[in-house]
Image (cartoon, rainbow, N blue to C red):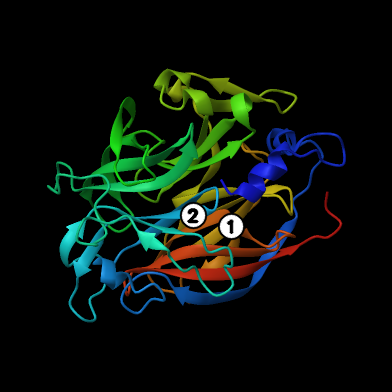
Amino acid sequence: MALSAALLIIASCSNGSTEAERMTEPAGNKTFMVKGTSDLQKIAQLTGKDSLNRTDEFAVHGTDLGSMFTVDEKTYFVFGDTFGERPEGMTGGGGSFWRSNVMAYSSDRDPSDGITFDGMIADEIGFAKELLPSRKIDHDEMTIIPTHGLSANGALYLYFMSVNHWGDPGKWDANYAGVAKSTDEGQSWSVVDGLQWPGDSGFIQVSPFTVGDGDEATIYFWSIPSGRFGGVQLMRVQEKHLEELNQYEYFAGADSQGEPVWSPDMSKAETVVDDSVGELSVIWNPGLKRWLMTYLREGQGVVLREGLSPWGPWSDPVDLVPASDYPGLYAPFMNDRFLSEDGKTLYFALSLWDPYNVFWFRATLETLEDAD
């Protein structure tokens, strides 16, 4: 989570409640603020030989995803299947020197002209190295894809899915979801033993956000199944217990006062957004004091929803990036560091299947000024 958001969390709001309390209070009489989006712009290409970062020099000619998490002044970008050499004009994933996952990092605080990487986690030759090795055997373990990262307890964590098989567009099978840990700023990683979710569960791809500070810090995870056709469920864990599977709680609905009910039983999890959701991203917008969620609706494009609490209600989706304008788009990832102060300018990473690289976009959120 960005430093600016962390400072807001521990500051007092004008009504006497802390930002953390506002982030997790029931919806009450709050109303939705976002009525639409406008001024969509593709600002820059972040990866590949034609990008402002020239990642081909790290043997990253083609890659995708690019979920982000921030630690102090550094933002880490986590990418999926990555290829060091590709035939000219090739569409989609493929090529030689395949790594299942790589990572870049940046201290760039100005998102208006794209994000310049300071470097990538590299091997002794200087090539971007695979963080989490996979067997690369179809119908066994085809690849390991990090779905999101975070900083907790003085370490870095990557939540990932072990992919058994890529199926039809938007469909794939997962063996399980797991977590890896780094204590040396991403240079080396080890899988956390026993911290796994079944491959047929709704907790395969996650978007985390930390609420609170110190011993009160709690991490919320909005989660979806493998593929792009499931709904969103929600789990949480205290930061200090992040590595203990039996400490995770699952949103199991709300009581008559709108207060959330949490269960240690994953099977009790309720759906908080019922839609065909691919590659979701969720952040708190301190300018609007609302949650934002972006994801791919297969065949339609990228949409955005506004949340009044972590568990909702969530607004109807509004169009953010139409698929008709950017064919082959997916993986719209946000980071709260890259918001304007008023919360109305949103920057995000987006993957395009052709040319199989990650791009930087911005959009304006149109709001109802008289909303709470």
- Please tell me whether residue 101 is drawn above or below residue 243 in the rendered image: below
For the point 73% across and 48% down, which residue is it? 289
Task: List the residue tagged with mark 1.
Answer: 304
Extreme residue toward the left, this view: 137
Task: Indicate the amino acid at tag 1.
Answer: Leu
Gap in angstroms between the C-alphas marked 1 and 2: 23 Å
Extreme residue toward the front, this view: 124
Left or right relative to 110: residue 33: right
- Please tell me whether residue 233 is drawn above or below residue 116 in the rendered image: above
Left or right relative to 123: residue 334: right
Q: Nearer the observer, disc 1 or disc 2?
A: 2
SS of the residue at dot 2? strand
Task: List the residue tagged with mark 2.
Answer: 75
For the point 38% across and 41% down, which residue is it? 158
Q: Earlier in the sequence, mark 1 or mark 2?
A: 2
For the point 38% across and 40% down, which residue is it? 159
At which x and y percent is residue 244? 41, 21
| Quadrant of the snapshot with the N terminus | top right
User: Can residue 314 be seen from the camera position used here?
Assistant: no
At which x and y percent is residue 13? 82, 41
- Please tell me whether residue 157 is drawn above or below residue 275 in the rendered image: above
SS of the residue at dot 1? strand
